[in-house]
Image: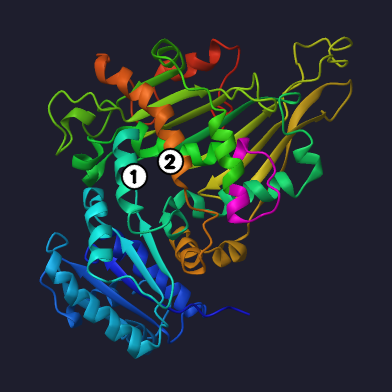
Amino acid sequence: MTKENIAVFTFFGATGDLAKRKLYPSLFKLYQKGYLKERFGVLGTSRADWSTDQFKDVVKESISGLESSAEEADKFASHFEYVAHDVTDQPHYSVLLDAIKELDERFDAQGNRVFYLSMAPNFFGEIALNIKSQGLISDNGYNRLVIEKPFGRDYKSAKKLNDELTLTFDEDQIFRIDHYLGKEMIQNIEALRFGNTIIESLWNNRYIDNVQITLSESLGVEERASYYDTSGALRDMVQNHIMQIISQLAMEQPVAFTDADVRVEKVKALRSLRVYSAVEAAGNFVRGQYAAGDEGVDYRDEDGVPEGSNNETFVAGKLLFDNYRWSGVPFYIRTGKKLADKFTRIDVVFKKPLIDIFAFPQQSDATLSANVLTIYVEPKNGFALTVNAKSAGQGFETEPVKLDFYQDEKSEKDVPEPYERLMHDAMEGNSTNFASWSEVAYAWKFVDVIRRLWDIEEPHFPNYLPGSMGPKASDELLERDGRSWVYKLDNK
């Protein structure tokens, strides 16, 4: 049985690309599945001078690719209203308040309010303060604030923003969206670890040699060049998505699977993450910027990119935890644009047996391969465990074989889209899959050291070709430790 959620949503930045591509389709899927029925309303607002009818047409267009009837789409859109608004115009918030109250009464939303900020983050603090000072906070229902990344540009700006938000909302009312936490296989990390004794008993430095996380993108910056050049791969991918994945891989088992208990353990893990000195950061992190290749142009020649930009489009690094479970186990990460393919995967590489008893009678140079547990996050969802088995035929030689599981087409259809899942969680007040302030703070403290170093160093860009897996220095980072990436172009 699905539980109906009751609320009035206010979308700041309602005419933006994210709202049209992700937010309205996600709400519609929740509506189709019965998580939203009749008792919800949506107020869209931005500076665009739109009418409500125009807004409804845009909403219906945004869901046109989903299976639905015209009647169902019209009924869904009937819950939407629009008010043009400048977020810096404090007196005009009274118009928003009137619209919210009208929607609350029309749909009997019981004073439940979700404020969704899908716009430039430099307005977040001001909007939150005006929501409070102009009386948009409900007295008889819940009030929740959902915000998009980036959450600051460094620890200092992130703390300033958080201080502004917490003048209006408590920490348990703030939902910092990281859509990677809504992905099915990222959420499966906890199920895989804590639901299987055979996995969790080996999940430590006695048995695991290293952990590898790859977030690969095949496209360049496209139309995001102007934003991306102020962010770069380090801020855009490492500080949020990758650090969140790492905290789930490294955390201890929570007392119970609740948002509070999970967050406690993620924060503990991040507290034990070694924050490098500048010298250590230089030795453990590499960056890259793509060249033109056979097609396209250098990053520096992309539209919207300043001439001679030193912004990185690729990052690889080694992270270390100073705690009992993970001491000595490197976590290798890499992410970049214009790489060989678009995919996300996690490879957990186990230590080889201390003695290879099969090596003595063999006449070949074959040796036992490391066991590898691979979590396929996208585009396919699944797991694979690489083990050693006897090769068919005479003699006794071993070869690696894969025991794998992938979700079938029907299962994948049932998987909620990340934004669909996370918007539902926000209405439920479940913050398990949202970043807490403490997590954000520790992530920024780690990343800031690397960022400060790179801001004063002159890189040799461009240094990798499209269709590769990044600069040579990324491979050398592991080779210095006597290791290599599990995913290679010649051994996918």
| Residue that appears at 19% across and 26% down | 309
- The three-letter code of the residue at mark 1 reads Phe
| Residue that appears at 36% across and 71% down | 65
Residue 342 lies, in percent from the top left, at: 43, 42
Disc 1 marks which residue?
A: 151
Residue 340 seen from this side? no
Front-most of residues 319 and 75: 319
Quadrant in the picture for residue 294:
top left
Quadrant in the picture for residue 126:
bottom left
Could you tell me which secondary element the residue under label 2 belongs to?
A: helix
Could you tell me which secondary element the residue under label 1 belongs to?
A: loop
Label 2 – label 1 distance at C-alpha: 8 Å
Q: Is residue 14 magenta?
A: no
User: What crowding class fits label 2: few (fewer than 14 Cα within 10 Å), some (14-19), or many (20 or more)?
Assistant: many
Disc 2 marks which residue?
A: 440
- The three-letter code of the residue at mark 2 reads Val
Give the left or right position of residue 93, taking residue 290 as reference. Answer: left
Q: Are marks 2 and 1 in contact (CB under 8 Å)?
A: yes
Q: Is residue 250 magenta?
A: yes
Q: Which mark is residue 98?
A: none
Residue 61 lies, in percent from the top left, at: 28, 74
Q: Tell me the magenta residue range.
A: 248-262
Front-most of residues 139 and 210: 139
